[in-house]
Image (spheres, helix red, strand yellow):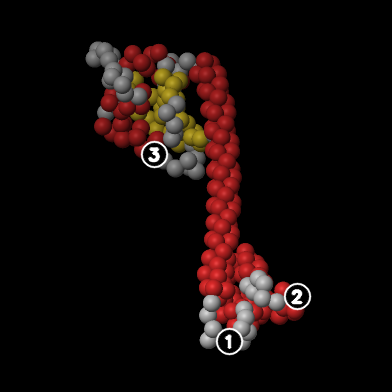
Amino acid sequence: MALVAALAAFGARELMHPVLEAHMPALFFTIAAVLVGFFLGIGPAILVVAIGVPVADYFFVPPYANFGYFDKEDIILFVGFPAATLLFLGMIEWLRRTQHEAKLFAEVASSRHQMLLRSDKRRRKAEASHLISDRLIRQFTDRNADVLYVGKVGSSYEYVSESLHKEIVPLEGASASERLIATFSASDASTFVAAFEQSSDEGTRSWSVSLPRRDPALSDLLCQLERFPTAHGAYLIMKIPPKSIA
């Protein structure tokens, strides 16, 4: 394409030679180089310049068809034409790079905007799920006094009844589940931890555990530990079975 452009520039200058004569011998080569630089890049444009300099000097600078005579017109052509054309090409290349960077920044900004929208959507969905779960659990615990503990698997949400608060080991800065693990025996603590670590695709499960009382004179409290998978996550519930309450 660069060779074709240089040939076209030579043909156009040859056609205009009766009008221009020795004036502006490299005009059409400059136009060809700028167009090639804009569409094809600076490398092919430099090739047009390299071809255009000797061709313009040989055919369009008097004495014509003679490299033996070298005067100021030749110097102006060999210095001015490449310098001006390369300046134009450099500016075009800088503008193209700036355009590319701006387009890239716009794509990155759009991508980050989409990521923020998706993140905000997930956050809103999680907040709505948490509010729904919290309302359901509050209604559930208010109507069931035998419920001692409710925890959501994979979340920090926990509900602890007043009676359970009095029985579990007090640990500064610890969560209710950590206090329960410290209160249980080793085997029941392992059962409690395993219930939290089970996969959410499993069905409802239940275990029997014994809760030691703070008062040594009282016997351990037999509790039922149940795990319920829901659409909003799995929940672990510890309650006193009806038989134990009776």
Residue 185 appears left or right of 235: left
Q: Which mark is residue 13?
A: none
Question: Percent x, y for residue 209?
Answer: 35, 28
64 is higher (above) or lower (below) than 151: below
Residue 19 circle label = 2
- The crowding category of the residue bearing disc 1, from other C-alpha atoms within 10 Å (few below 14, some 14 to 19, many at least 20), is few
Name the residue beneath numbered marker 1: 66
The answer to whether any part of residue 242 appears in the image is yes
The residue under the point 43% across, 24% down is 158
In this view, the residue in front, 6 or 81, is 81
Q: Which mark is residue 197?
A: 3
Classify 109 as above or below 140: below
Helix, strand or loop for disc 3: helix
Distance between the alpha carbons at the discs numbered 3 and 1: 91 Å
Relative vertical location of residue 104 with respect to residue 116 in this rendering, above or below: below
Asked whether the viewer can see residue 169, the reply is: no
State which quadrant residue 87 falls in.
bottom right
Of the image marks 2 and 3, the number of the one nearer the N terminus: 2
Distance between the alpha carbons at the discs numbered 2 and 3: 91 Å
- Residue at position x 62%, y 66% from top? 34
Mark 2 and mark 1: Cα distance apart in space: 21 Å
Q: Earlier in the sequence, mark 2 or mark 1?
A: 2
Is residue 64 shown left or right of residue 232?
Answer: right
State which quarter of the image contains the C terminus: top left
Q: Nearer the viewer, mark 2 or mark 3?
A: 2
Q: Residue at x 55, y 24 (%)?
A: 131
* Circle 3 residues within 10 Å: few <14, some 14–19, many ≥20: few
The correct choice, above or below, for 77 with respect to 230 in the image is below
Tag 1: amino acid: Asn
Residue 139's spot in the image, x, y percent? 55, 18
